[in-house]
Image: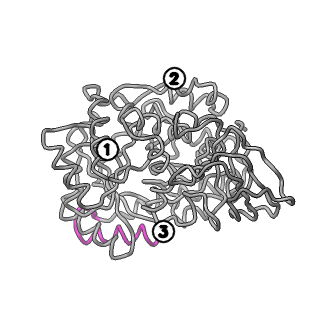
Amino acid sequence: MMQNKKTAIINTNVFDGNKIVGQKNVVFQNGIIISISDEVPNDAEIINGEGCTLLPGLIDAHVHTSEDSLRDALKFGITTELEMQGGMTQKGRAIQIKDWRNLADVRSSGMALTAPGGHPDELIPKQEGIPSFILKKMEKMTEQEKKDFIAAFAERENEEGNILDVTTIEGAVQFVNQQMENGADYFKIMIEEGTVMNAPGLPMIKPEVLKAAVDEAHKLGKIAIAHVLTAEAAKTAIEVGVDGLAHLFIDRPDWTPNLIKSIADKGIFVTPCLVLNSSIIGNSACHVANDIRVQHKLDEDWKMTMCSCFNTFPSGKMEDSFSNVKDLYDAGVDILVGTDVSVPMAHLGGLAHGVSVHHEMQLLVEAGLNPTDVLRSATSIIAKRFSLSDRGRIAEGLRADLVLVKGDPTKNISDTLSIMGVWKEGEKINLQVD
């Protein structure tokens, strides 16, 4: 999708992924940034960025995605999504995506290690065959696209039918290798007892089995991330050797300071997904969906979803999540911006692809984080922790994944939603609903 023409965004305040570097002119060609300077080239298409800030393409460090969702994300300046359970491995991408134009890039863990009947089974409506929300999407497909999609779905079902006993060390290690053979980019484990999901008593895999799986992922050169929603689960994740937590624990026991110290001491990153915690305790994100900068980019299904919520743990307090993430931040823990957005269904509400990244950044600032650091958490920090060395910063030689916003989000984080332009690998993106 890279274009040969040279483009220059001039007179713009540049946040390079780490800091504001002042008013500069950023030039890119063939999908790559070629200069950042005070010079204006005489052979380029000129875009005047006066009164705006240029950001690296934003990254969502926790999604469950699809081709349509990758398209939705890009309209909000999210140029990369990191899937934390699903079919967008290298093998899956080759099968599912034929044309990457107007789609965010994606990486995936493949399927996460969980016990039979364990999380997230409690969230999945029990039905045979292809789920209804996917059937609805298929109505827009050509006959050939439908055939390809059904074949991919059947292959996934067949793979899942080839059951390993993942509750054993041997089976779990085989499972890790199976994901890597599919082209998983990292590995994920589930540590979920179910109370926060209003499903207490979910089956779980024993810590020694989880540790064997994490060790195997490390042997294969992959990082391992754990789903955790409680402090106790986070403690287990640390003990089995994970590199990152895919959620922020929603509770705050009196031993939380020791937990935070352990996370910091071991260099573990945390993707808080405050937007999810907010939804879990019963808050919708209707106010975000109704923002004039958002409305025209969401279809009715996603507006409905944003105006719904999980509401599985109404006794939770947002103040606890804010305190937990601020304490982690103050301890020097790498905080990553992620959302856990998946599909447009009411019981998975409060989230939507793309826009929820901006909502997450707002909540992180509300929790007490510095806006500049929050922008780093959505760009360069994620790129570093997931070894995405070609993105996450505005620098010569890197991908021209760029977002131009009106205002200055280092002073007012909400300005990230005032999107004037998005470029993925140098190509300008259509920001309207198709």
- Residue placed most toward the observer, 367 or 133: 367
Q: Quadrant of the N terminus?
A: bottom right
Q: In the figure, 241 relative to 309: above or below? A: below
SS for dot 3: loop
How far apart marks 1 and 2 lie (CA) works out to 23 Å
How far apart marks 3 and 1 lie (CA) works out to 29 Å
> Which residue position holds label 1?
248
Which residue is farthest right? 43
Residue at point 22% right, 62% down? 240
Query: What's the mark number on residue 182?
Result: 3
- Residue placed most toward the observer, 417 or 275: 417
Q: Label 2 crowding class (10 Å Cα cut-off): few <14, some 14-19, many 20+?
A: few
Q: Label 3 crowding class (10 Å Cα cut-off): few <14, some 14-19, many 20+?
A: some
- Residue 60, x across and y down, in percent: 50, 49
Residue at point 60% right, 48% down? 55
- Amino acid type of the residue tagged 3 in the rendering: Asn
- Amino acid type of the residue tagged 1 in the rendering: Leu
- Residue 118, x across and y down, in percent: 29, 49
- Left or right, 278 with reference to 313: right
Image: magenta residue range: 165-184
